[in-house]
Amino acid sequence: MDLGLRDRIALVCASSKGLGRAAAEGLAKEGAKVAICARSAELLVVAAEEIHKRTGADVLPSVADLGSERDVERLVSNVERKWGSVEILVNNAGGPPSGPFENHSFEDWDRAIQLNFLSAVRLCRLVVPRMKEKRWGRIINITSITVKQPVEGLILSNAVRAAVVGFAKSLANELGPFGILVNNVCPGYTRTDRVVRLAEAQANTGRSLGEIYQTWEKQIPLGRLAEPDEFASLVTFLASERASYITGATIPVDGGFIKALL
Ligand code: NAD
């Protein structure tokens, strides 16, 4: 299937590793030009080189903290200066800390709202005007299974990511007439550093790491965690021409974890 992504310009946020990196590589494999970002240059530059080496695609690394308005503005202007405008925006950021309600300070809530909700709003404010001019665009928000089924011990994610879904649905309605598609993707348990950290946090409560992975695997009909590239395939498809009639959707990649019908 030709996905029609050759020479499209993509900005994939929080992409020096994990899901963001896999999504960037998925788009690069299909011939898109890909801008990636993270807070420090160390892993980011290596990721850019590796993605370029594996795919031959142009990759632009920019150091940016997605919690900073100035950094986000600089990030988008770096892409615009180099390639014109952002045509595909993949919103993503590091996940909020785990733990029950009483463990989180008000600053934790503020940081989660800034990073996991407002960073997406900020980026959309910056890229939507040019997408409207071009009458083409893709906005894909990386959220979590928590938007469909709250996960125990992840109250910040359970609460804050729901706002992204409401925002995206409204935006999809407003931007549909301009050929801009807005969708959410919900990773389930996927083998990245984030999941290792979550397992370690739970292991502190007395169970072994192996037991924690087994508990998760038992709840997943496919019986295993996902690999990041299995998640990236959906992002790449939604960014493509082939996804031309999909907007306002919230789609899990969870091995069947979510127990609800819809
Ligand atoms: P990860 O820890 O493997 O990677 C996170 C990436 O975000 C890294 O590149 C890191 O440098 C970057 N980053 C973190 N904070 C940043 C900031 N302030 N500014 C810029 N870049 C920043 O995590 P992941 O597993 O790839 O998760 C990505 C998102 O998906 C997170 O929000 C996570 O909570 C969510 N998620 C992950 C899973 C999973 O199983 N992996 C499941 C559900 C939801």
Image (cartoon, grey):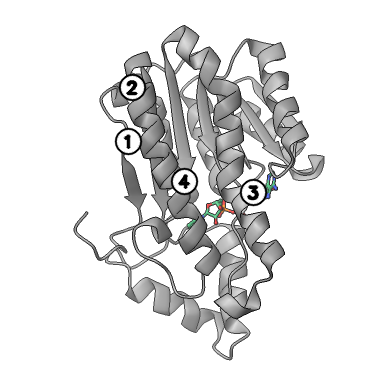
Task: Answer whether labels 4 and 2 touch (C-beta < 8 Å).
Answer: no
Which of disc 3 and disc 4 is earlier in sequence? 3
Q: Return the residue nearer the eye: 86 or 100.
A: 100
Q: Return the residue nearer the eye: 89 or 119.
A: 119
Kind of element beneath mark 3: helix
Q: Which residue is mark 3?
A: 114
Residue 133 in sight in this render: yes
Q: Position of residue 149 (x, y in %)?
A: 35, 64
| C-alpha separation, residue under disc 3 versus residue under disc 1 | 22 Å
Residue at 42% x, 32% y is 236
| C-alpha separation, residue under disc 3 versus residue under disc 2 | 26 Å
Q: Position of residue 77 (x, y in %)?
A: 71, 20
Task: Answer whether labels 1 and 2 touch (C-beta < 8 Å).
Answer: yes
From the viewer's perspective, is 63 left or right of 32?
right
Residue type at the position of mark 4: Val
Task: Give the position of the N terminus as an image quadrant.
Answer: top left
Residue type at the position of mark 3: Gln
Task: Give the position of the C terminus as an image quadrant.
Answer: bottom left
| C-alpha separation, residue under disc 1 versus residue under disc 2 | 9 Å
Which of disc 2 and disc 4 is earlier in sequence? 4
Q: Which residue is mark 2?
A: 176
Badge number at residue 248: 1
Residue at 61% x, 34% y is 122
Please determine whether, in this image, residue 240 is positioned above or below residue 208.
above
Assess mark 2: CB under 8 A from ligand 1?
no
Q: Which residue is mark 4?
A: 164
Kind of element beneath mark 4: helix
Q: Position of residue 39 (x, y in %)?
A: 76, 44
| C-alpha separation, residue under disc 4 versus residue under disc 2 | 17 Å
